[in-house]
Amino acid sequence: MNHDFLSNFDGSVDSGDVELSLDLWVNEISDLIVIDSDKVVALLNKTNVPAKITDSDEELVDKILTNVGTNKKLNRGISFLIGEQNNLIKEESNDWREVIDKIANTYEVVLVKFSQIPSLKASVKNDIMQHIKSKANSSKESSGVDGSTAGGRVIFKEETPDEVKTKRKKIFWWVVGGVVVLTAIGFGIHYYRKNKKAASLLGEGGALLNGGSTPTPTPIPTVKPNATTVAATAANVTAPTAVPTNITPTV
């Protein structure tokens, strides 16, 4: 927990060790929240990020990580607090301003990634919360205090019964809305297919009524006569009786 921040910071920058630089920032942020949470809350409000002293440590971490990548004033303010808690701010010299600028400019490149890579933001949050919990537990052990608070502060945000009910209602209505939408889509597809089929049948009937070609009837197969059967039939036919020609017609 105790280290020469400026020496380690300069070493990480000179060697291009981004991971070490980020680890140093995580350690400093956790120190600020555990030790000087009131300064963190004041800084958030000054940089247009609403915060309350009653916010849990987790809520403060979320507000910092959500805004520090895009809020340059917040980044510079945190860099100033880091310099202040490491005794880098010296009124008799202006060199500290250059140090704060170097800290802010170095971390600006890394912190902007929080808004672009959610997984990086989540990983950094997890690291900060582990630092806070460890330092809070050490503080409680040294003071003989037990529980989930450090100096009267809540580390992790706890949902009230009303918040739980509200969240459950939202989830319920989201589920109901999803079912309704899916049902409507299903009926829509069903009626679309049904109407499309009916339109197809009507189109075929309309073509016939409007002079279209009629379907070609299936030809009836012809049976070739059997020669033996035809001869037998002809033999059984009786010859017609001859009509006399010497009869005078009667008027």
Image (cartoon, rainbow, N blue to C red):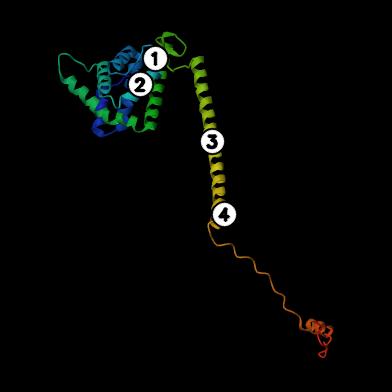
Marks 2,3: beta carbons within 8 A: no
Figure quadrant of the N terminus: top left
> Which residue in the rendered view is the most extreme toward the left?
93
Amino acid found under the numbered disc labelled 2: Lys
Instruction: Please give left or right for residue 245 compared with residue 165 in the image.
Output: right
Mark toward the start of the polypeptide (2 vs 3): 2
Residue under numbered circle 3: 184
Q: Secondary structure at mark 1?
A: loop
Q: What label sits on residue 55 in the rendered view? A: 1
Mark toward the start of the polypeptide (1 vs 4): 1
Amino acid found under the numbered disc labelled 4: Gly
Residue under numbered circle 2: 63
Marks 1,2: beta carbons within 8 A: yes
Instruction: Please give left or right for residue 150 compared with residue 225 in the image.
Output: left
- The CA distance from mark 1 to mark 4 is 74 Å
> Quick check: can you spot residue 20?
yes
- The CA distance from mark 4 to mark 3 is 32 Å
Instruction: Please give left or right for residue 31 compared with residue 184 in the image.
Output: left
Residue 66: percent from left, percent from top: 35, 25
- The CA distance from mark 4 to mark 2 is 69 Å
> Quick check: can you spot residue 26?
no
Residue under numbered circle 4: 205
Q: Secondary structure at mark 3?
A: helix
Amino acid found under the numbered disc labelled 1: Asp
